[in-house]
Amino acid sequence: MRFGIVLFTSDRGIRPAVAAKAAEERGFESFFVPEHTHIPIKREAAHPLTGDESLPDDRYMRTLDPWVALATAAAVTERIELSTAVALPTEHDPITLAKTIATLDHLSGGRVSVGAGFGWNTDELADHGVPGNKRRTVLREYLEAMRALWTEEEASYDGDFVKFGPSWAWPKPVQAEVPVLIGTAGTEQGFRWIARSADGWITTPYETHTLLERLQLLTKVWQEAGREDTPRVVALDGKPDTQRLTEWSAAGVTDVLYGLPDKSEAEVLAYLDRLAGKLAPLRASA
């Protein structure tokens, strides 16, 4: 089991490069950041946690661009994985986004993965021209098109939402395959989508107590889809609990992420020190 950090970035508080460097120095193996391009003031979409149009945190409207944030982190780190929890690829042009991610993977030495979401904020998606009832189809096509650009010497794609003829696009990612993880509720529908189009699952913050049951369903769906590999499972956790983490590891959780507090740099670094200390016994016994 690997341990990582997720920083809910904003235009205040600790900078991503500082947080990523500090996390790497303390032995954490991954660094994740979120994405929202903007938050429409007038919305019909309900937030999954609040159940209505209110937001649980004002950082939703203040998030930094994830790929710029990760690029700054890449420049001051050497080993830590650089990822998103979660990015919204359908809010970008897929050709230029493929270039951005491939460039980051190239410059970081192959340390990028893509944590993507379907997008709960359908009003935000609508401003990008994405129909809310088609957002899963759009994401599937975007990922397929980006993979073509990443892996094929002459790439092309012909879908309902993405179309381009034979094209050259470099750099290619350092990795043979850029891992794609999907952040969504642990339902059979979601798992079937992941088994078809992705490499793993990022849990939602409110599935801690049902995670073992969800993992059984994921395993069943994965096998039924004929996948011969093992899904990567990235679980969002609150406070470390040795027994719970041991159970998660045995059930197939590969990564656990801990969120940083929205506090001053000194307080965040002190929190990282405490968190690393609590996880040290688990690392030693691994």
Image (tube, rainbow, N blue to C red):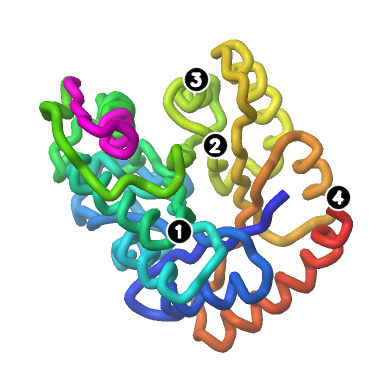
Q: Is residue 69 above or below residue 228?
A: below
Where is residue 61? Give x, y as percent: 29, 63
Looking at marks 2 and 1 on the same chain, the residue that comes earlier in the sequence is marked by 1
Q: Amino acid at mark 3?
A: Arg
Neighbourhood count class around disc 1 (C-alpha, 10 Å): few under 14, some 14–19, many 20 upward:
some
Q: Amino acid at mark 1?
A: Gly
Q: Residue furthest bottom?
A: 266
Task: Point out the frontmost of discs 2 and 1.
Answer: 1
Does the magenta portion include 47?
no
The residue at which mark 4 appears reads as 243
Label pair 4/3, CB-CB below 8 angstroms: no
SS for dot 3: helix
Q: CA distance from mark 4 to mark 3?
A: 30 Å
Q: Amino acid at mark 2?
A: Trp
Task: Point out the frontmost of discs 2 and 4.
Answer: 2
Q: CA distance from mark 3 to mark 1?
A: 32 Å
SS for dot 2: strand
Q: CA distance from mark 4 to mark 1?
A: 35 Å
The mark found on residue 227 in the picture is none
The residue at which mark 2 appears reads as 201
The mark found on residue 192 in the picture is 3
Q: Nearer the viewer, residue 205 or 158?
A: 158
Left or right: 11 as drawn, with respect to 95: right
Where is residue 242? Give x, y as percent: 84, 55
Q: Is residue 132 above or below residue 189?
A: below
Q: Is residue 140 something that shows in the picture? A: yes
Task: Point out the frontmost of discs 3 and 1.
Answer: 1
Q: Amino acid at mark 4?
A: Gln
Q: Which residues are magenta?
A: 144-159
Q: CA distance from mark 2 to mark 1?
A: 24 Å
SS for dot 1: loop
